[in-house]
Image (cartoon, rainbow, N blue to C red):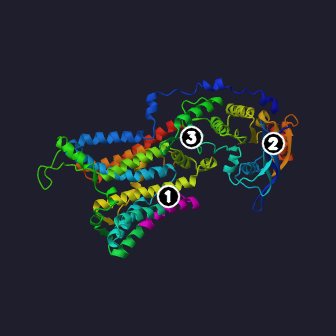
Amino acid sequence: MSQPLIELIDIEKHFGPVIALNGVSISVMPGECHCLLGDNGAGKSTFIKTMSGVHKPTRGRILVDGSEVAFASPRDAMQAGIATVYQDLAMIPLMSVTRNFWMGREPIRKIGPLSFFDFRKANAVTMEEMRKMGISLREPDQAVGTLSGGERQTVAIARAVYFGAKVLILDEPTSALGVRQTANVLSTIAKVRAKGIGVVFITHNVRHALAVGDRFTVLNRGRTLGTARRGEVKPEELQDMMAGGQELAELEGSLGGTV
Amino acid sequence: MTEQHSKTRPVASAAELIADERVKQISPLRRALIRPELGAICGTILVFVFFFAIARNSGMFAPEGVLNWGVVAAQFAVIAVGACLLMIAGEFDLSVGSMIGFSGIVIALMSVTWQYPVWLAILVAFAIALAIGALNGYLVIKTGLPSFIVTLAFLYILRGLTIFISISTTRQTIIGGVREVAAGDPLAWLFGGKVLGWLFVWLADLGLIGKFVAGPRAGQPVVDGIPILIIWALVLVAFGHVLLTRTRFGNWIFASGGDAQAARYVGVPVDRVKILMFMFSAFCATVFATCQVMEFGSAAADRGLLKEFEAIISVVIGGALLTGGYGSVIGAALGALIFGVVQQGLFFAGVESSLFRVFLGAILLMAVILNTYIRRMITGER
């Protein structure tokens, strides 16, 4: 098997007296969708922020393509090809799709000593990338606010892919979406994987994870409870691990097994 | 229970998405109409129609009348451009008015009282203003406080300092005599006087505009040039508009105001953008102050009172969103034009001038209501 795109080994993160992460390890292979499952407060957010360069780990090692790295900022992580799509911070609704897509990396057209935003190129690329992801825009200067939640996630994913992401971290991309929009986002994930990009898919929905995941890592109280391959684990087991087992089993009994 | 279920869930194909029956096509007319400036365009037309109806014969639309309200509109426009870009970047500057008084006193004090060359006085005033603008921005960024509060503090600090400096050095709040020391200065002409005088002489010779028939200026055209403040306004509006809509930096201004955190995550230098916009706002205030000092030949510690609100009103009439991330420099300039036309138009129409505020408040309200409606159409908010 080839080398992992990114590997995090025994990551610990302490915030003062609070131990947010207490030994978390995962690796992401090219073209793999690695699902990171965990209940609220399990440390998912802290972990992806460590992976994307927002936090520095207190202890532990991060390897990108086999060599150890230390990210000083999210920019460093982006340079290394690690892109993060945050659930609610992906897009600015008042701005057009093109302006959002190119935000921070606007193409430039020089006229003499002056440089201008190259809208012709930006619009053409945006329309083309959106079409590849299966979203038909009415026009590229349409505001992102007119798109649905799933489409916004897709624009953010398309943006990360276009700008050369090798590892794509998706922070609960489906948690606020309806059934059909969730399906769209999951199908986008499948398209991204097909390009050989490694996907880290954070969710607390076992069904969404099982729909696209190759491997599953469960976080609970700042630790990894282990990683399982597709087919090696039952949804009920994942659910139990996420919630810490016992209490949920009792709850589930009283709810008729629907959680 | 779940794996089977989710695997069989239909995944929408691209073709299905392209023909989305719930996306209505919108007509080209509607597309042309829904833009941030629409409210200001309607307001401008309304105001012109109104004054054309009631003050047509008062000389308001003769060349000298046009210049009269043109200068007032240009004054508003100069400070509105700075306020507009800053507001789109997500911040306010309430210290604009005090900055006008402060910069004016700095120029007059240095050039008249301390007898430095006028060009040096102007450069020092700009340097101090830019530094204060940067300090405003730095404090807002570092403390995370609303810029409303931080610049409100500077509204008082600067006004108080202006009066204090002026009284403690000259024992008065007005410093005159600037025009005399500015004569022949290599920089002062950029802020005072008129340009294109030859054009108007030529136009008068052609009989297109009138000449004075009597008095000391007999034979000269009634309009002897375009005040340089109008040129400043046009240049600043053009600069602001191009910067905002056509450059990478403009995209960063929108992004900083739209969602600073999201912008930071994709590498937009939000802090730098905001601080630069505070500095630009201070720059515009100082342009205003310098032109005013050169025009009147004096500086007074109470100049620029309430200008910050007039700038913000122009910007809001122009379609900008108070919370940032959305707006238009052209709109703000039209807002300033409405301001100038209404203020001077009521005078031409012989209407009691206190009605100016009533009229302005009504226009502000109408423009904002219309703008809210347009914005909902553009952004799909509900």
Query: A95 or A197, which lies in front?
Result: A197
Main structural element of the magenta stretch: helix, strand or loop?
helix
Chain letter belonging to callout 3: A
Q: Residues within 10 Å of mark 3 (few under 14, many from 20)?
A: some
Which picture quadrant has residue A182? Answer: top right
Q: Residue at x 36, y 41 (%)?
A: B43
Is disc 3 in the same subunit as disc 1? Answer: no
Q: Residue at x 33, y 75 (%)?
A: B170
- Judged from the image, the secondary structure of the residue bearing numbered disc 1 is helix
Chain letter belonging to callout 1: B
Judge from the rendering whether residue B168 lies leftward or rightward of residue B345; answer left or right: right
Query: Is residue B360 magenta-colored?
Result: no
Which picture quadrant has residue A133? Answer: top right
Residue B248 % position (x, y): 53, 45
Q: Amino acid at mark 3?
A: Pro
Residue B57 % position (x, y): 19, 43
Where does label 3 land, which residue?
Answer: A107
Numbered range of the magenta stretch: B133-158
Where does label 1 land, which residue?
Answer: B148
Where does label 2 land, which residue?
Answer: A4
N-term-proximal mark, 2 vs 3: 2
How far apart marks 3 and 1 lie (CA) works out to 34 Å
